[in-house]
Image: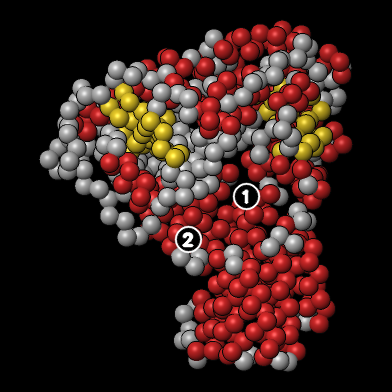
Amino acid sequence: MPEELLDWQLACDRFAREGDVRGMRACAQEVRAIGGAEAAREAQAMEADAALYAGDGGAAGRLAAAVLAAEPAHLHARLVLAGADSRAFAVARALDRLRALQQDLERDLLPYTQGKPRAAAAREKWARHRRALLYRALLFLADDAYLAAMPEEAAAALHKAAALAPDAGAAAALYSKYLFMRNYRVQPDAEKREEAALFGAFLGGVQPYLQEHILRVPGKRLRIGYISRDFRLHAMAYFLAPFLRDFTPEAFSVYVYATGPVDEVTRRLRHFPVQWRDVRGRSAHTVARLIAEDHIDILVDLSGHTQDNALPTLAYHAAPVQLSGLGYVATTGLAAVDGFLVDRVTLPQGASEAAFLERIVRLPHCQFCYAPGAVREMPEVAADIPYQRNGFVTFGSFNNLAKLSDETLLCWRAILDALPDSRLVLKGKTLSVPDGRALTRSRLAALGLPVSRIELRPFSEHYLEEYRDIDIALDPTPYTGGLTTCEALYMGVPVVTLRGRTHGSRFGASLLTAASLPELIAENEMEYVKKACALARHPELLAKNHRKMRAHLQASRLMDAKAYMQDVERTYRALWEAYCQRGDDGAAQYPAAD
């Protein structure tokens, strides 16, 4: 391959990373001018790639297919064709293409990954281009695998992509997504902690604030900062209102650092009496400086390793006490995060804390307070349960299908086997595309579930009303529902959950304990199946509880915002006093976990 062609390929790769469609098309023109069949095919692949970036998947697919008709193994054209499939939600076909492409590219690059001496400059350019193609293939693969409810494959792709990322920021973001994806399946505590602890290395070069200017006055009015991109229509928004509305203004002032997009929910939340900082698009360093200038005493991260999170800002340790935990189920892995908020159910006293790098800080009751009114108007509960019109019990799960582990599905198979007339409704984004439905049916059949009795529903804006078709909701494991559980209960539907062995697998148990519904918590798989079946065999009890469920929930600790904030504020105060009393060696003497 002529070195000139390699140079233009690398230029096109750079323009692709920057999303510069005009630059990509200019590269195609230069390559075509080189002359020859090889250059002509590469120029057409570049044009196909530019079309893909411009949002014209149809044109991209046609151009790439034309290249492959002449050269079936053309790597760039294969990537574009797979990307066009991905954009068209032809998930199964995209996955097949991307897996094959990944395999071929990794085989080509094997001498480079095994540390063998590199050849001439042209050979190195050739390898750089293939690494760029592999990087993009892995990004497509991660997205498609996640949409197909295959979190293990998505995690593996993200891990490899992080190692190939073009800059430190992209690498950190991809590794963060990898850590998030790992929560969908069981992972040993020590491994979880060790993997998360590596995240800090991706943020290299951060110089934390020294906190020398902080006045350690135990009884002062504390400045509390909350940072997240989820002050918007998002699952976390349903738990945010108490922090912004029900705090004690004489003892605390509240600052919000909103890093994400603005919508109607954002505008609702901004009406609360807090200092609002819209920091969209600002660098982590700039946001950290603003936090320091605001003299925040305790900074609370509400996102963890979720999408576009604020952990790079927390790495600067701009506030003397930094906490995480409410918007995420596992350790952040950052030494700059001092404490991780849990409760006595999600991580009871005496439970293993080996999965966490942070100090565990336990709230005495549930770590969540459900407050849907600040986000949306909730529909009315149906007058009757579905059994009364159907004559059979309908189970349901509206959770992300990536949460449906084999262990979960095998429990559900046992329930359906024990109740031959029952039905199961699954609903989620995966089921919004034909390939997602086909892949789900195939997986259910492979695990022996009665597919003919399982209804697959796509995501819809008015999904809450569809709880009127559900008698009993089933919680997945090990990544249980959070908002989904609260919504089902609020719509009058009982939720059966399995109390797992890790923090993230006990969210359901915590929510049901706070809702004063401990009878819906199972301690093992067998009890989970028995509890679901026992409920189904007593439809008259289901109907009675259905009518009372919303009022019961509203009167419970799960929705008692004032009591919740009293717990939270006592915790903040104890943490601040511990900071004020920290030893000369710099080690914070935190209060007892309870």
Residue 519 percent coordinates (x, y): 60, 16
Q: Secondary structure at mark 2?
A: helix
Which corner quadrant of the image does residue 386 belong to? top right
Q: Position of residue 111 (x, y in %)?
A: 54, 81
Q: In the structure shown, which secondary structural element does the residue marked by tag 1 occupy? A: helix
Q: Which residue is mark 1?
A: 151
Which residue corresponds to the image point at 64% horizontal and 12% vertical from the top-left? 549
Q: Residue at x 84, y 26 (%)?
A: 420
Sequence order check: which comes first, mark 2 or mark 1? 1
Q: Is residue 82 left or right of residue 501?
A: right
Is residue 370 something that shows in the picture?
Answer: yes
- In depth, the one of 356 and 256 nearer the eye is 256
The Cα atoms of the two marked residues, 2 and 1, are separated by: 19 Å
> For the residue marked with disc 2, what is the amino acid?
Ala
Q: Quadrant of residue 189?
A: top left
Residue in front for this viewpoint, 89 or 438: 89
Color scheme of the displayed model: secondary structure
Q: Residue at x 76, y 26 (%)?
A: 466
**Quarter of the image with the N terminus in it:** bottom right
Q: Position of residue 61 (x, y in %)?
A: 78, 67
Which of the two residues, 45 or 453, is positioned nearer the viewer here?
45
> Image quarter for residue 428?
top right
Q: How crowded is the residue under tag 1: few (<14 C-alpha within 10 Å), some, or many (20+)? A: many
What crowding class fits label 2: few (fewer than 14 Cα within 10 Å), some (14-19), or many (20 or more)?
many
| Residue 528 drawn above or below residue 582 | above
Where does label 2 land, which residue?
171
Residue sitting farthest toward the left: 584
Query: Which residue: 48% across, 14% down?
Result: 560
Residue 348 visible in this rendered orientation of the protein: no
Mark 2 or 1, closer to the camera: 2
- Three-letter amino acid code of the residue under disc 1: Pro
